[in-house]
Image (cartoon, grey):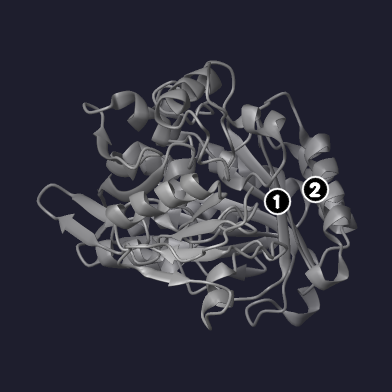
């Protein structure tokens, strides 16, 4: 990497920040608090022309190039040391067609922004579970959230995209125009260029039955929860965390610090039907807290506190979580020394599983459960290696033969793990697209797919 000697990028209409600017430190901060990279410049681009000029400048100077949307990359890939960060936060257009139930959205929007805007028309597209995530990054990774069982992954609702590739060319791609590049964008991450706008299919989502259900953390409760989630109708999606009960007002003081199953549940059908759908979960044990209620869909994306705690995730897929696995999870979380350890389970299936494995670059359609061993820790105490070892150990204990991983939750873990996200023919097909649109691997700060030969 060559550090820039003339850090100002000429002829862009957006804002350029360098280390001397007051806003620079805020602009370089990312969600991965262990990352403290200092780009030579941050280009807050105003559109495709700016992006093309920044790409050309990076190539001319031999500078490393990072692309930042919402800044939620677990590896902190939205910034780089000594190079250039393309900041998409100004690309916030939103054009909704209520008659066609579609929307073109700028890649600088967050999932929360998009969800609020679409909700004005009682429509939604499923993203993840966090409002501050950028729609570009989560979409390109796949998108596994509150609507995954009813309406599929985010990429299953992506209709088109506009992307500036390494040659500076703006391309609009869809199922008819450059279909192979469009296939690669749906799950292949930021390997192929800078996505500026995305066109989504919107689904009718208004009042949902949703919120938190907190149950005692026992093997029978956890195994029963996963079994009920797998058996539930597609309208119900769940994200369950085994964790120590936090000191929150809705948790009885005597139970704070004890292991619980804290689940976010979302039923998108009729509310009365939803109440019947969640009844088996409530019957697993006397709830520690039951906050399930009818709500507007955007209420599921509250503001996220801005803290600088360290966090890491070890992601994997599994075929089941029975009582044996539940015992391992509870034991593992209980033994962690992190401030807040957790093991998250997202039961898949439903609409996401009915898409052919080769229809998009997300190849894990038949995986039944995504498991994420997570640790939040005090980054000032240099504990990351210890907690990473704990997460790897728990994941290894739970491994049951499914080799896949979700690219959206990968840290900087090496090529073997990236290949696990894109197994076999998926990797080869992605590498072939990469060789066409980015043969020099300009876009390499990502879960990188090297160009094929």
Q: Secondary structure at mark 2?
A: helix
3 displayed left or right of 363 = right
Alpha-carbon distance for marks 2 and 1?
A: 7 Å
The image shows residue 449 at horizontal and vertical percentages of 56, 31
| Residue 247: assigned label | none
Quadrant assignment, res 46:
bottom left
Quadrant assignment, res 114:
bottom left
Who is closer to the viewer here, 437 or 174? 437
Q: Which residue is mark 1?
A: 313
Residue sitting at the far left? 99
Q: Which residue is at 18% across, 57% downward? A: 96
Who is closer to the viewer here, 183 or 192? 192
Near mark 2 (Cα within 10 A), the count class, few <14, some 14-19 or many ≥20, is many
Up-down: is 87 above or below 59? below
Whether tag 2 and tag 1 are in contact, CB under 8 A, the answer is: yes
Q: Which residue is mark 2?
A: 391
Near mark 1 (Cα within 10 A), the count class, few <14, some 14-19 or many ≥20, is many
State how many labels appear: 2
Q: Secondary structure at mark 1?
A: strand
Who is closer to the viewer here, 432 or 4? 4
């Amino acid at each position: 990497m060559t550090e820039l000697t003339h850090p100002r990028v000429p002829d862009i209409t957006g804002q350029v920040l360098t280390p001397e600017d007051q806003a620079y430190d805020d602009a370089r901060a990312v969600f991965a608090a262990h990352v403290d990279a200092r780009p030579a410049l941050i280009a807050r681009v105003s559109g495709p022309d700016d992006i093309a000029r920044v790409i050309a400048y990076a190539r001319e100077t031999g500078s490393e190039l990072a692309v930042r949307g919402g800044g939620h990359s677990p590896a902190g890939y939205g910034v780089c040391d000594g190079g250039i960060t393309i900041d998409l936060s100004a690309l916030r257009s939103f054009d909704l067609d209520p008659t066609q139930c579609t929307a073109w959205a700028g890649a600088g929007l967050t999932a929360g922004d998009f969800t609020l805007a679409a909700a004005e028309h009682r429509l939604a597209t499923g993203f993840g579970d966090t409002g501050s995530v950028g729609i570009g990054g989560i979409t390109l990774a796949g998108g596994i959230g509150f609507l995954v069982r009813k309406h599929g992954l985010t990429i299953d609702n992506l209709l088109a995209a506009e992307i500036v590739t390494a040659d500076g060319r703006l391309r609009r791609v869809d199922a008819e125009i450059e279909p192979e590049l469009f296939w690669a964008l749906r799950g292949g991450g930021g390997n192929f260029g800078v996505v500026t706008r995305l066109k989504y299919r919107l689904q009718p989502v208004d009042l949902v039955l949703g919120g938190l259900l907190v149950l005692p953390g026992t093997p029978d409760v956890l195994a029963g929860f996963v079994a009920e989630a797998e058996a539930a109708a597609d309208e119900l999606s769940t994200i369950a965390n085994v964790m120590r009960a936090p000191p929150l007002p809705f948790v009885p003081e005597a139970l704070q610090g004890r292991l619980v199953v804290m689940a976010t549940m979302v039923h998108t059908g009729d509310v009365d039907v939803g109440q019947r759908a969640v009844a088996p979960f409530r019957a697993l044990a006397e709830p520690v807290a039951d906050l399930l209620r009818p709500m507007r869909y955007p209420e599921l994306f509250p503001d996220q506190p801005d803290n600088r705690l360290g966090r890491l995730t070890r992601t994997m897929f599994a075929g089941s979580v029975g009582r044996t696995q539940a015992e391992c999870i509870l034991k593992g979380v209980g033994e962690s020394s992190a401030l807040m350890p957790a093991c998250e389970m997202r039961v898949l299936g439903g609409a996401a599983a009915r898409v052919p494995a080769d229809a998009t670059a997300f190849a894990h359609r038949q995986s039944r459960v995504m498991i994420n061993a997570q640790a939040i820790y005090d980054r000032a105490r240099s504990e990351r290696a210890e907690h990473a070892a704990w997460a790897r150990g728990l994941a290894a204990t739970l491994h049951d033969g499914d080799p896949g991983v979700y690219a959206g939750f990968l840290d900087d873990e090496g090529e073997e793990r990236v290949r696990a996200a894109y197994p076999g023919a998926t990797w080869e097909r992605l590498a072939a697209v990469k060789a066409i649109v980015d043969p020099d691997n300009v876009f390499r700060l990502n879960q990188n797919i090297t160009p094929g030969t």
